[in-house]
Image (cartoon, rainbow, N blue to C red):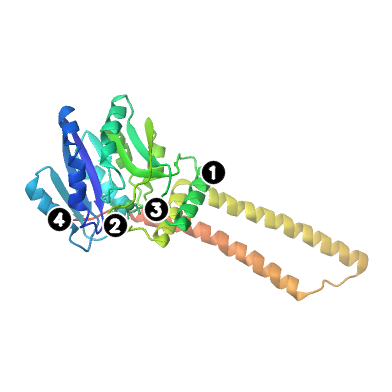
Amino acid sequence: MKLLSVIVPCYNEEENVSDFYDELMKNSEFFDDNEIEVEVCYIDDGSSDRTADEVKKLIQQDSRVRLVSFTRNFGKEAAIYAGLEKASGDYLVLMDADMQDPPALLPEMFSLLEEGYDSVATRRVNRKGEPAVRSFFARIFYSTMKRISNAEIVDGARDYRLMTRRMADAVLEMKEYNRFTKGIYGWVGFKTKWLEYQNVERRKGESKWSFWKLFIYSIDGITAFSTMPLAISSFMGVVFCIAAFIFIIIIIIRKLLFGDPTDGWPSMVCIILLVSGVQLFCIGIIGQYLAKTYMEVKKRPIYLVKEEV
Ligand code: UDP
Ligand code: MG
């Protein structure tokens, strides 16, 4: 018998907890046929609703269900890390509680894994039902990321992924505090098969990601997997030095040839504003990296557990 751990990060998902369980268990015939034992690990990411109680109800019915509750909301990345750490399966799969990651895909994912892959990942080919602005910025993010980072980050990639123990262990080896799992998977390597499917809309409740939260997350992603912004700021410094040098020479020559007093304070003000703006911008970029480094050196735990059942 092989053990499959299903890891479900939940943040205020009281309506979805038991629906998810039912949906997953529709595959039970497949699990039995292939001699797969299943454990379902719900990671309650500091929910303020009755998510934990709902999971406990399930635990009373089925001893294969487990619950890990955080002391507060640590974010989905922390929940994923905790899940991989706490689950003991030979195979591990990460799934959202809102049924956007269809459990019906599991058999296909399994058969691909048997073919010798270390992980089977999913990407949605469209973003049906998502606000247009959000899709637009997501596209920009992925195309920028592709250009500035050498970790492979796939557009439309979901967190829905089935992997072997050795891949999960590799992911766990990366103990960084600022986690961007989509980049981490690419970084650790291993043979990955991509499955494509049409986007499924969240069944109940609302998305936990506001536009602002996603924006911050994208900055985390960029700083975690690329130092290109730093290179760009150095480059801008060089460009500005060259421009300044050219201007100095022009002004000196003009003065010598025409005795022309340098005119106009408005142009001066514009230059000062432009240059100081660029300077602040570059300091901001350095600041971002410094802040991330600061958080890393503190070595704070990625999550704290309140309760484990
Ligand atoms: N989630 C979490 N912690 C958070 C935010 C989200 O564990 O801080 C979980 C959430 O409960 C869900 C999954 O991550 O199971 C995906 O979240 P959501 O559906 O809100 O994101 P979307 O699908 O809209 O990107
Ligand atoms: Mg969702």
Q: Is mark 2 within 8 Å of ligand 1?
A: yes
Disc on the earlier residue, 4 or 3 = 4
Alpha carbon separation for disc pair 2 and 4: 20 Å
Q: Element at badge 4?
A: helix
Q: Residue shown at 12%/42% (left/top)?
A: 64
Q: Residue shown at 70%/67% (left/top)?
A: 271
Q: Where, by quadrant of the figure, is residue 184 drawn?
A: top left
Q: Element at badge 3?
A: loop
Disc on the earlier residue, 2 or 3 = 2
Amino acid found under the numbered disc labelled 2: Phe
- Disc 2 vs disc 4: which is toward the camera? 4
Horizontal arrangement in the rendering, residue 177 relative to residue 126 (left or right): left
- Residue 190 visible within the image: no
Q: Element at badge 1?
A: helix
Disc on the earlier residue, 4 or 1 = 4
Q: Disc 2 designates what residue? A: 74
The residue carrying pointer 4 sits among few (fewer than 14), some (14 to 19) or many (20 or more) residues within 10 Å by Cα, namely some
Q: Disc 1 designates what residue? A: 147
- Residue 119 visible within the image: yes
Disc on the earlier residue, 2 or 4 = 4
Alpha carbon separation for disc pair 4 and 3: 28 Å
Contact? badges 1 and 2 (CB < 8 Å):
no
The residue carrying pointer 1 sits among few (fewer than 14), some (14 to 19) or many (20 or more) residues within 10 Å by Cα, namely few
- Disc 4 vs disc 1: which is toward the camera? 4
Which mark identifies residue 54?
A: 4
Amino acid found under the numbered disc labelled 3: Gly
Q: Nearer the viewer, residue 230 or 99?
A: 99
